[in-house]
Image: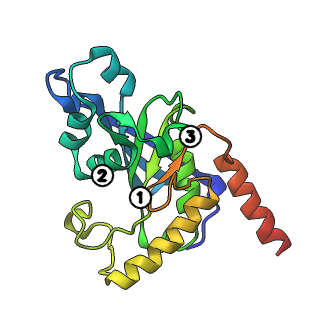
């Protein structure tokens, strides 16, 4: 079903552990409903992890590695790309100078009838805009499959994909996200990043797409 991205909106709710003696306290999990139209029909959901770097530095209670690695494989993998001994690696230090928090877009899922319309980049950019412009926003352009733990009870009707099919879809996702301003920070990076340096807004991306459809 074709939709006009101008009429998409987002509604978020966040959760984080209360206890300060748990390294997970410094990571908020944010669930985002992707809504469409005046009726605000839910057409998808996204899941985001926000690492509160300012609190980590101020409290000085846990090593950065302990927080990322103790939370999830997703954040552990991101740590390995960005940090070494809790310091930014030289390959990304200049790009990420004076950054605030670290945000990982864990997943963006749409109902089957709304997929395949190139909405990934627009949605990722709209989600990124909910955070501080100095935050590092990362995502991994890889499709979820039916066996993914996020696909509880098969509610998202995700397909079973071969490795070759996953790579093909990952290539399309990467193009969509890069069009939105996400980019690898070094050769071989598995993640794409949106930094505080220049990139389009979600509205600009939508308007440019609409203009091309009109003149095409």
In the rendered image of this protein, does residue 153 appear above or below residue 37?
below
Residue on which disc 2 sits: 77
Q: Which mark is residue 119?
A: none
Residue 57 screen position, x and y as percent: 34, 20
Using the image as rendered, state which of residue 163 and residue 129 is in the foreground.
Answer: 163
**Which comes sooner in the sequence, label 2 or label 1?**
2
Callout count? 3
Mark pair 2, 1: CA separation: 10 Å
Residue 33 screen position, x and y as percent: 42, 49
Name the residue located 39 percent from the left edge and 83 percent from the top edge: 165
Q: Are marks 1 and 3 in contact (CB under 8 Å)?
A: no
Mark pair 3, 2: CA separation: 19 Å
**Which comes sooner in the sequence, label 1 or label 3?**
3
In the rendered image of this protein, does residue 64 appear above or below residue 194?
above
Quarter of the image with the N terminus is bottom right
The secondary structure type at the circle numbered 2 is helix
Name the residue located 46 percent from the left edge and 76 percent from the top edge: 169
Residue on which disc 3 sits: 95
The secondary structure type at the circle numbered 1 is loop
Mark pair 1, 3: CA separation: 19 Å
Task: Classify mark 1: residues with Cα within 10 Å, few (<14), some (14-19) or many (20+).
Answer: many
Residue on which disc 1 sits: 140
Q: Nearer the viewer, mark 2 or mark 1?
A: 2
Q: Are marks 2 and 1 in contact (CB under 8 Å)?
A: yes
Task: Classify mark 2: residues with Cα within 10 Å, few (<14), some (14-19) or many (20+).
Answer: some
Name the residue located 60 percent from the left edge and 65 percent from the top edge: 3
Q: Quadrant of residue 154?
A: bottom left
Q: Nearer the viewer, mark 3 or mark 2?
A: 3
**Which comes sooner in the sequence, label 3 or label 2?**
2
């Amino acid at each position: 079903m074709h939709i006009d991205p101008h009429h998409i909106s987002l509604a978020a709710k966040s959760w984080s552990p209360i206890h300060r003696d748990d390294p997970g306290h410094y990571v908020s999990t944010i669930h985002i409903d992707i809504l469409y139209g005046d009726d605000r029909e839910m057409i998808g959901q996204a899941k985001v992890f926000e690492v509160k770097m300012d609190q980590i530095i101020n409290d000085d209670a846990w090593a950065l590695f302990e927080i990322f690695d103790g939370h999830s494989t997703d954040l552990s993998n991101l740590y390995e790309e960005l940090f070494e001994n809790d310091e930014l690696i030289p390959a990304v230090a200049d790009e990420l100078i004076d950054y605030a928090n670290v945000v990982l877009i864990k997943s963006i899922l749409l109902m089957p009838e709304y997929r395949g319309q190139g909405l990934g980049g627009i949605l990722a950019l709209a989600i990124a805009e909910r955070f501080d412009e100095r935050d590092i926003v990362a995502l991994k352009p890889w499709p979820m499959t039916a066996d993914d733990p996020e696909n509880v009870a098969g509610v998202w009707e995700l397909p079973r994909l071969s490795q070759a099919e996953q790579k093909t879809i990952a290539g399309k996702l990467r193009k969509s996200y890069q069009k939105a301003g996400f980019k690898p920070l070094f050769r071989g990076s598995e993640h794409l990043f949106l930094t505080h340096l220049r990139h389009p807004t979600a509205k600009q991306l939508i308007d440019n797409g609409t203009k091309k459809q009109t003149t095409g």
